Image (cartoon, grey):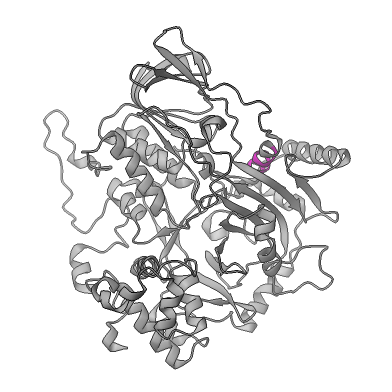
Amino acid sequence: MAEDLPTEFDVIVIGTGLSEAITAAALTRIGKRVLHIDRNDYYGGQWAAFTFDKLLAWIEKKQNLKSAENTPSLYSHDDDASQKRLLLPNDVIITRNVEMKCYCDETPITLKDNNNAKSDAVDNELNTEIIKNQHDANTDENSKSQDQSSSELDQVNSDLVIGEESSKSQDCNMPDKDVSDLVINDKEKKVYSYQDLKDSWRRFSIDLLPKLLLCRGSLVDLLIKSKVARYVEFKCVTKILTYKRNELVQVPCSRSEVFSSTLLSMLEKRILMKFLNFCLEYEKHEDKYKDYEHRSFSEYLNSCRLSKDLQHFVIHCIAMVKGDTTTIEGLAAAQRFLRSLGRFGDTPFLWPLYGVAELPQAFCRLCAVFGGIYCLRMNVPELIIDESSNRCIGIITDEGQRISCSNLIIDTSYLPSALLHDEPNKENSISRAIFITDKSIHPTETDEVVLLSIPSSDHSYLIRALEISAGSMACPEGLYVIHLTCPMKSSAKEDLGNLANLLFNFKGTEEQPDIRKPTVLWCTYFNQVCHDVKEELPSNIFTVNPIDSEMDFESLVAKAEKLYRNICPDEDFIPSPPDPEDIIIDDTVPHHNTDKNEDSTGFSNYEESAETQAEGKDDRGTDPKLFPPADET
């Protein structure tokens, strides 16, 4: 209960998104008293993952939200004349243009956003009845292997296990026709109904904001350093695809894949290998790109004699940037990709089992271990501002309790709309679509995590598709969850509809469906918008926007560290916690682990020791078997 809370904290954090969770964990790690609050009944905010029934409830809630007709006043008077109260009316809508459609039944079921759809009263009655039936349905499950909820912090794993990946190179074309036909024909034996989805509700773990970890990125380093890795399990992304020559093809990443690819000529292979080796240490050869440093990356690739196909692979699938990105930014992005190759698998990306929502929960657990206090389902209607110092000195809870603090961190979606720009920040706002299908977009005989990167028709932005299978603990066996994401240009349906039509069959929309494509059973579209703060806040209120359009976590970790530095500029950012055997209790000499090869973070079977790195890696941190020195090509 709120009345049982202490009345004074060093820092109050409002919102349990990833950046807030990392910052809260860092603060408690150095002894700060932290209260972490969320108005929802789940962790993560926009980083949450839901079972299928919970996702339907979330969609219904977002569809029924309405903007405030009248902008409320920002401040009210406090009992103390030297103080005022900043009102937080929760009037900001960050999830918009929500549409949902089910194709499982003979008559497709359609739900549209009440704020944007032009539907009549009959449609509204149908929507209400459908949602009611969905919530009344029995969700009892067969309690076999995959029935775990990613919304509970007390059920985490003790070790981080990277899914073992085959080290053999794969052909960079579509799978062998006989194999793919075998898989497709096998899947076609099962015809799914809406009842099948309802019966498997609890086996889904569907992310609102899916992202991937770079194997040598800042988040993986932070997981190791903080030992939060013990709370999460991962699986390597198996393959990276793109769309070329009217089909999905696998992007050659490693040296063996480049030279085994049938997409490239021998000359193209050698040019590509030479260029990738240059990217790994481009800082040492400034003379080669100096004239193009602030010109577009595509211009520089033209000067390097890369063909159109090679430019497509480098820009959209390796650097994963826009064509008009500057050369220096493109080279840095390609270097990050290449340096992460070979650490845990044949691609540079990791995906958390049960979804990205496990990450904020894991950092919240670390915060709680070191004394942080968590309150879900708690609204904060008012902040207390001292007018003389222009600082936030506390909050008022929805139960009327007054809690003081020295600093406050707040998710911008909790701020009143009057403090935010009317127009969303389109660079960070995103269009999202989620599909449940009966087949993989790139069928194989094993469950895989597949990334697809495709430029828009005008090459002004990238669209990413991430396919999650049962092996990632995110959906039932035989079904696939496919996430589409791109920067917001219009509504999500308009931004992503063309790619969806390219990848999938939709029941009732095609006379002769392509049997190679998966069939969509259910889908939803929505936009997640980002609003920047337009007015200056008190000096000790620090805001964080939970949404950005990046595929990885680099910018989010940077945000978290910046928040931390604003409060504790001279402290180490999440110092490594002590091992249990190193803790001294009652002057007892601790028992030290003498096994030098064991890594308590859970990376022991996969992360190289310092000696192994020195012997088996060159100074670029990349396996020389993947990319040899340039003079060997």
Left or right of residue 52: residue 581 = left
Q: Residue furthest right?
A: 122
Q: Give the overall secondary structure of the magenta segment.
A: helix
- In the displayed structure, 140 sits above or below 77; it is below
Q: Residue furthest bottom?
A: 266
Q: Residue at x 47, y 36 (%)?
A: 411
Q: Residue at x 81, y 44 (%)?
A: 118
- In the displayed structure, 160 sits above or below 461; it is above
User: Quadrant of residue 120 in the image?
Assistant: top right
Residue 66 location (% of width, % of height): 69, 33
Q: How many marks?
A: 0
Residue 502 location (% of width, % of height): 69, 69
Q: Which residues are magenta?
A: 53-60
Between residue 78 and residue 197, name the one nearer to us: 78
Q: Is residue 171 visible?
A: no
User: Quadrant of residue 11 in the image?
Assistant: top left
Q: Is residue 55 magenta?
A: yes
Residue 302 location (% of width, % of height): 44, 82
Between residue 155 and residue 543, name the one nearer to us: 543
Q: Is residue 101 visible?
A: yes
Q: Is residue 263 magenta?
A: no
Q: Please identify the quadrant where the C terminus is shown.
A: bottom left
Residue 609 location (% of width, % of height): 22, 62
User: Quadrant of residue 509 in the image?
Assistant: bottom right
- In the displayed structure, 102 sits above or below 114; it is below
Between residue 556 and residue 412, name the one nearer to us: 412
